[in-house]
Image (cartoon, helix red, strand yellow):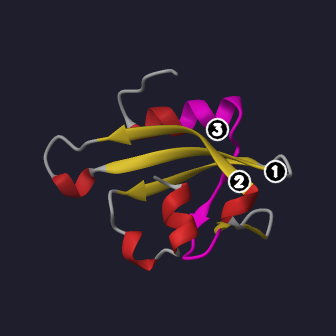
Amino acid sequence: MKNYDTLSEAINDLQANDYPYDFNLKPECLECPSLKIEIRPEDFKVDKTYRFEGMSSTDDNSILYAISSKNGVKGLLVDAYGVYAENLTEAMRKKLR
């Protein structure tokens, strides 16, 4: 797995090389606004996970997930450490561990 120094470097490289779509995190699924679809936890897998820690503040911590769906849609999800955990269903929480 390739290492990246910054979140933006990782996003740019992954979008150019396999993961063109952006996903939004919803409590029970992932949403891909550009395709107008929702993907349930049982219909996707996390291929790669990248963690980034901010230099000046823990508020800058984030996780980048490279995700593939069963129907072939590949994209990225950016999540701040723990920010959304309380709003997720158990299935989504387990999937994004």
Q: Amino acid at mark 2?
A: Phe
Drawn side of residue 57 relative to residue 32, left or right: left
**Element marked by disc 1:** loop
Q: Position of residue 22 (x, y in %)?
A: 64, 55
Marks 2 and 1 in Cβ contact (< 8 Å): yes
- The foreground one among 57 and 42 is 42
Q: Is residue 84 visible?
A: no
Q: Which residue is mark 3?
A: 15
Tell me how far mark 1 sits from mark 3, CA to CA.
Answer: 19 Å
- Of labels 1 and 3, earlier in sequence is 3
Give the numbered dot on residue 44. 2
Q: Amino acid at mark 1?
A: Lys
**Distance of label 2 from label 1 (alpha carbons):** 6 Å
Q: Secondary structure at mark 3?
A: helix
Q: Considering only order in the chain, which callout, 2 or 3, is on the residue closer to the N terminus?
A: 3
51 sits to left or right of 33: left
Disc with the residue nearer the chain's start (2 vs 1): 2
- Amino acid on which the number 3 mark rests in the picture: Gln
Give the label on residue 70, or none: 1
Give above or below for 4 relative to 73: above
- The kind of secondary structure element at disc 2 is strand
| In the displayed structure image, the side of residue 91 where residue 49 appears, left or right | left
The picture places residue 65, in percent across and down from the top left corner, at 53, 46
Residue at the (61%, 75%) spot, across then down: 28
- Can the viewer see residue 2? yes
Residue stretch in magenta: 12-29
